[in-house]
Amino acid sequence: MSDIETRVSTGWKRLASTLVQGAREDASDGGTLVNIPPTRGSTVLFPTLEAMNRMDGRSHAHKAVYGAMGTPIQHELEKLLASIEGGTHTQVVNSGLSACTTALLAFLGQGDHLLLPDSVYGPTRRFADTMLKRMGINTTYYAPLATREEVEALIKPETRIVLAESPGSHTFEVQDVPMLADVAHQAGALLFLDNTWGIGVFQPFEHGVDLSIQALSKYPGGHSDVIIGSITVNDEGHWKTLRDASIQLGQCSSPDDCWLTLRGLRTIGVRLAHQARSALEIAQWLKTRPEVARVLHPALEDCPGHEIWKRDFTGACGLFGVELKPDISVAAAERMIDGLSMFGIGASWGGYESLVLPTTGHVRRVTGEGGPKAATFRLHIGLESVDDLKADLARGLDGLAGVDQ
Ligand SMILES: *Cc1c(COP(=O)(O)O)cnc(C)c1O
């Protein structure tokens, strides 16, 4: 295996044993089930008022006075997630998007200023541009590959959070998170990271991140049947702020969804290692195709920020972008996508199945109106045979030749 092939699939080895043995019931008292069963519940009964009052003061504890504080399986999932991300505490919430919005609402107030990368997940951008704006919180967008000086120039006295998302949604820029964290900290602000692509292969807190967001609906769930998210921190003060806001916002997740996510996490290491290898093989092969201008996979040199990926990541996942040559029209590319049989057309990613989504038109605000107008699409590589996937893509790309562009 080449260096890069080994690299894309190594990150999970470190976590393999934790994933299998973490979040298990203590068996020292006798037999227990391997898997923690989902416990459904809203009301918790207490023998006396005094016992109830004692629990009420402990909303940060893992046992609770009411189901909205989270059920035992949610708390076990939270502990396992905290250990994967290397943080001290995790809050599980009802979607990846609400992980983004809850984290921002917890730490921002009227008059505060937020820096978002131009490559940020679309619904996070919309939240900043509408709800946060209405609350008197202003957002400035920065180029995902901005230099230290360029980011520093955007910092204001009221800047409270710099958010990074690496690599960026649809355009895959790998960001210099340690530099951004340093700029944020120098200004007395915090660095938040949407770490959905990098789960397990980018250790946020080792790189200066203060708060890490995950859309668990992606690889942790892993089977396209759950919507769930998480927020992880590495500081007691931040945990208190986050936990208080989560309770005030009514954030929790259903025991069934927590159970599915915990089940998904048991196998995420092997799934991701396999999907990462298949994705790299397909990305490298796509690069040799005459119809392809660039493959936006962080492990390939074409990808903006590739050097940072090499420095900071211990692996990759199965999601990457493809930009076709400028003489291929968007309409022709769309016909090609419609004709693929192995790739489902659909939003989201991280399941066991391959997906394709056109991404043309994700022109960025700062990186410009002059951005690529070429036909682009995003591939998610699942657990199918690589040969079948390549053959399907080859048929599609062959079909582009000679069509009426
Ligand atoms: C999918 C995704 C989200 C949102 O997750 P949902 O669970 O679908 O709400 C947030 N951030 C990133 C980077 C994502 O890819």
Image (tube, rainbow, N blue to C red):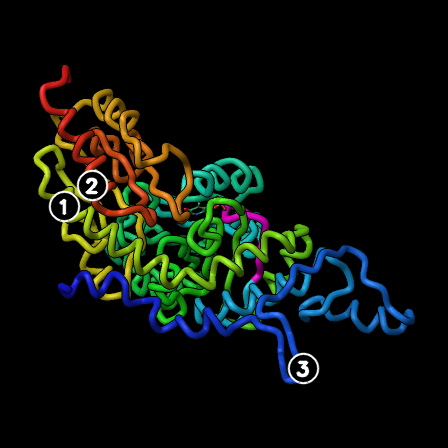
Question: Which region of the structure is painted magenta?
Answer: 91-98
The answer to the question of whether label 2 and label 1 lie on touching residues, with beta carbons closer than 8 A, is yes
Q: Tell me the distance, in whole angstroms, between the alpha carbons under discs 1 and 3.
A: 53 Å
Residue bearing mark 1: 285
Horizontal placement of 150 versus 85: left or right? left
In x, y percent, where is residue 279? Answer: 25, 50
Looking at the image, which residue is at 20% across and 46% down? 282
Q: CA distance from mark 2 to mark 3?
A: 51 Å
- Viewer-proximal residue, 361 or 151? 361
Q: Which mark is residue 97?
A: none
Circle 2 sits on which residue?
390
Q: Position of residue 267 (x, y in %)?
A: 43, 61
Residue 60 versus residue 120 in the image, above or below: below
Between the C-alphas of marks 2 and 1, the distance is: 8 Å
Determine which residue is flagged by label 3.
30
Which residue is more in the foreground, 350 or 48? 350
| Secondary element type, mark 1 | helix
Which of marks 1 and 2 precedes in the sequence?
A: 1
Residue neighbourhood size for the residue with mark 2, other residues' Cα within 10 Å, grouped as few (<14), some (14–19), many (≥20): some
On screen, residue 217 versus residue 352, left or right, reads right
Across and down, in percent, residue 182 comes to 34, 66
Which corner quadrant holds the N terminus?
Answer: bottom left
Q: Amino acid at mark 3?
A: Gly
Q: Residue furthest right?
A: 48
